[in-house]
Amino acid sequence: MVIKRNISKEEISQLPKASFPGKIYVIQTEAEAEKAVDYLSSRQVLGIDSETRPSFVKGQSHKVALLQISSEEFCFLFRLNLTGLTKSLLDLLENPAIIKVGLSLRDDFMMLRKRSPLKQQACIELQDFVHPFGIEDKSLQKIYGILFGEKISKSQRLSNWEADVLSDAQKLYAATDAWACLNIYNRLQELERTHSFEVEPLPEESTDLDAANQQS
């Protein structure tokens, strides 16, 4: 596989849409959170992301409303605006034995700490993780497009994440983002393990190579 360094918005727009293929669970009580964490604690690697209700008024802000945590098969949407950060969730985020993969994790955890103090452990930031593979783009949508040839819809990003009932579109959007982080990590781990990738040459590298070929 040749890994591109960048992908344009125009190229992204032409790609087929990616969506989480597994089962989505909406978690709205502390008891449900405990059951979900019981399952998630059995996994070695998880994808995570969060959503916050957007503010369209200057000076107004909201606390993070949703924390989505995904395995390959199941994604759990923890409605923090209803439950807060439960002890079971905090234990999971602070568990050094379970890898949590996400993008822009610094921002996610900054928002989560506004709900409760926590010291996250075993976290992998994809913006750093993709660097050795030559990927220069930093957005989840572009990284996913480069590696999978599919696009992640961002249409629900500015929707109301504190709504009484999350829409099917919101649930699928949230689950897809967390799952995509896990998918990216798994794909890169596999490429590294099998040594089955090469990085797209830089433009000047291509020019030098062409010149060398012409001379020979």
Image (cartoon, grey):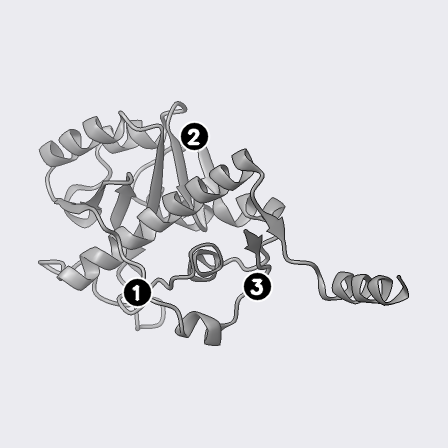
Q: Height in image: 45 above or below 4?
A: above
Q: CA distance from mark 2 to mark 3?
A: 30 Å
Q: Quadrant of the C terminus?
A: bottom right
Viewed as shown, does residue 204 lie left or right of 26? right
**In the depicted structure, whether residue 162 falls above or below residue 43:** below
Q: Disc 1 marks which amino acid?
A: Arg
Residue under the image location 77 percent in, 65 percent down: 204
Residue 157, labelled with which disc? 1
Indicate the secondary structure of the residue bearing disc 2. loop
Mark 3–mark 1 Cα distance, whole angstroms, equals: 23 Å
Relative to 110, 167 lies left or right: left
Q: Amino acid at mark 3?
A: Asn
Residue 131 in the image: x percent, y percent?
A: 60, 48
Q: Which residue is mark 3?
A: 6
For disc 2, the neighbor class at 10 Å (few under 14, some 14 to 19, many from 20) is some
**Residue depicted at 75% across the width and 64% down the height:** 206
Q: Residue at x 43, y 47 (%)?
A: 184
